[in-house]
Amino acid sequence: MAVLRIAKMGNPILHTPAAPVADPMAPEIAKLAADMRDTLEDIGASGLAANQVFVSQRVVVYRMIASRIPDDSGFGPVPWTVMVNPVITPLDKEKQTYWERCLSIPGLHGKVPRWPNIKIAYQSLDGNNIEQEAIGTWSALLQHECDHLDGYLYPMRMTDLSLLSYNDEPGPLAEDAAAGSKIDPLFQRLVDDWPGRPRWLGD
């Protein structure tokens, strides 16, 4: 087991596009993917791009667990998945906004425009070419991780920076939740744990 160090916002590797992987079946790619999974399991997080752990290769490891899926999302849990050289194709004409956090930007969250439906094509560790469609918060997660491979952090995608907040002061998020928006249960817990919510929202 290897738990890797996460690059934080400000490190140049996070703004450097990652290189394509020439051979997805190479042993070093399998080891990298295993270490990335170990890192995610240690932190309890959902997704990680290779350049977040200082490896400039186009590799993403992710999962979708039941406790992170909003009700009535139209999809279920997704097991551990390794995507090598992923390519996203939007299936919508308009974006929707989703709340996001990032291991490379600890303590903050923001609301980010994303395509609600996408097709993603990638190679597996055994060299197979795979295509699948993703929707909702699953789609947003994949776009977030693939953005890392292109040198983008989620605040660079935001169109309203007033919606960038600290996790312990989730005012805009709490307003969104109070309005009945369908949000990731992780973010609902930020709202539920916010001591200042009754003062500002009156509940």
Image (cartoon, grey):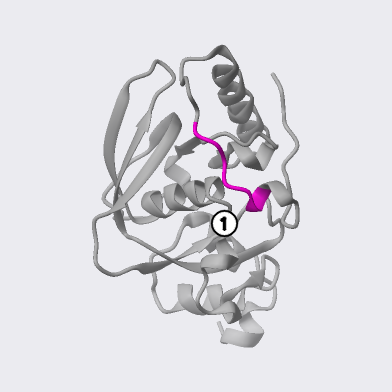
* Total residue callouts: 1
Residue of label 1: 152
> Which amino acid does the dot numbered 1 rest on?
Tyr
Q: Is residue 119 above or below residue 92?
A: above
* x then y, percent, for residue 33: 56, 25
Let me know if residue 192 appears in the view: no
Residue displayed at 65% across by 42% down: 52
Determine the secondary structure under disc 1: loop
Q: Which quadrant is home to the N terminus?
A: top right
Left/right placement of residue 80 relative to residue 156 reads left
- Closer-to-camera residue (178/7): 7
Q: Position of residue 198 (x, y in %)?
A: 62, 81
Instruction: State which quarter of the image contains the C terminus.
Output: bottom right
**What's the residue at 26%, 50% (across, down)?**
74
Q: Residues within 10 Å of mark 1 (few under 14, many from 20)?
A: some
Residue 96 pos. (x, y %): 36, 68
Q: Which residues are drawn in magenta?
A: 14-20
Residue at image location 72% in from the left, 31% down from the top: 4
Up/down of 128 relative to 173, above or below: above
**Relative to 199, 72 lies left or right:** left
Instruction: Identify the residue at the far top of this view.
Output: 27
Majority secondary structure in the magenta region: loop
Q: Is residue 146 visible?
A: yes
Does the magenta segment cover residue 82?
A: no
- Foreground residue, 77 or 141? 141
Horizontal relation, residue 196 to residue 157: left or right: right
